[in-house]
Image (tube, rainbow, N blue to C red):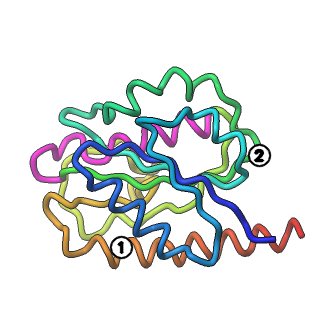
Amino acid sequence: MSTRIGLFYGSTTGNTEAAAELIKANLNQFTIDLFDIADTELTLTENYEFLIFGISTWEYGGLQDDWESRWESLTQQDFSGKIVAIFGQGDQVGYDEWFQDGIGILHDKLTEQGATAIGYWPNSGYHFTKSKGLNEDGSEFLGLSLDDDNQPELTEQRINDWCQEIAAVLQELTCETA
C-alpha cells in the first residue's frame, strides 16, 4: 500500500497553491491529497500520518488569511505521532525583518502539539535581516523557504531538491514501520 500524505495550504496570490501543486508532482511516488484550507477543515489532518503544510508570511510577520481563520482549530488538535514538513512563501526584500515568520510560527505550534518536523532547509542564497522561521543557530529554515516575489527562478529547483529530501526520509520511515 502506498504512503498517503495530506498536503494542506493557504494561498492568497496563488504562489503557495502553485508550489503545493509542484510539490505534489515531485512526490508522485506517494499518494498526496491536496487541500486548500480556505474550504477545508483542518480536522482532516487526523486522517494522515504524514502531513505537508504550505503557509505564507504576510506584511509584518502575519499569517496568511486562511491560516489566520483556521488557527484556533489547529491549536486544538493533537499532532502526536504525526510527521510534518512545512514550506513557506515570503518576501525577503520588502519584509526582510519578518521573512518566513509563518514557517516558524506554524512549526512551533505543530511541534508543541506533538508533531515531528522534517524538511529543514539551508539558510543560504537569501538576503534578509531577521526570521522566526530559522532554527536556533540560524543555519536552517524550519521548512522549505520560497520567495516568488524576488527569486521566482529558483522556486522549481528548490522544490525539486526539497522533495528529494522529503521522499528519502518518508521512504526510510515507512520501511521502519513495515
3D distance between C-alphas at marks 1 and 2: 27 Å
- Residue at the left extreme, as displayed: 94
**Residue 81, image x, y percentages:** 77, 46
The foreground one among 161 and 67 is: 67
**Residue 42, image x, y percentages:** 57, 34
Tell me the SS state at disc 1: helix
From which residue to which does the magenta span run?
A: 92-112
**Residue 8, image x, y percentages:** 50, 47
Within the image, what quadrant is residue 61 found in? top left
Residue type marked 2: Gly
Which residue is labeled 2 in the image? 81
Residue at 53% in and 78% down: 164
User: Is residue 106 located in the magenta-colored stretch of the structure?
Assistant: yes
**Residue 149, image x, y percentages:** 15, 57
Q: Quadrant of the N terminus?
A: bottom right
Give left or right: position of 65 versus 72.
left
- Residue at the front extreme, as displayed: 39
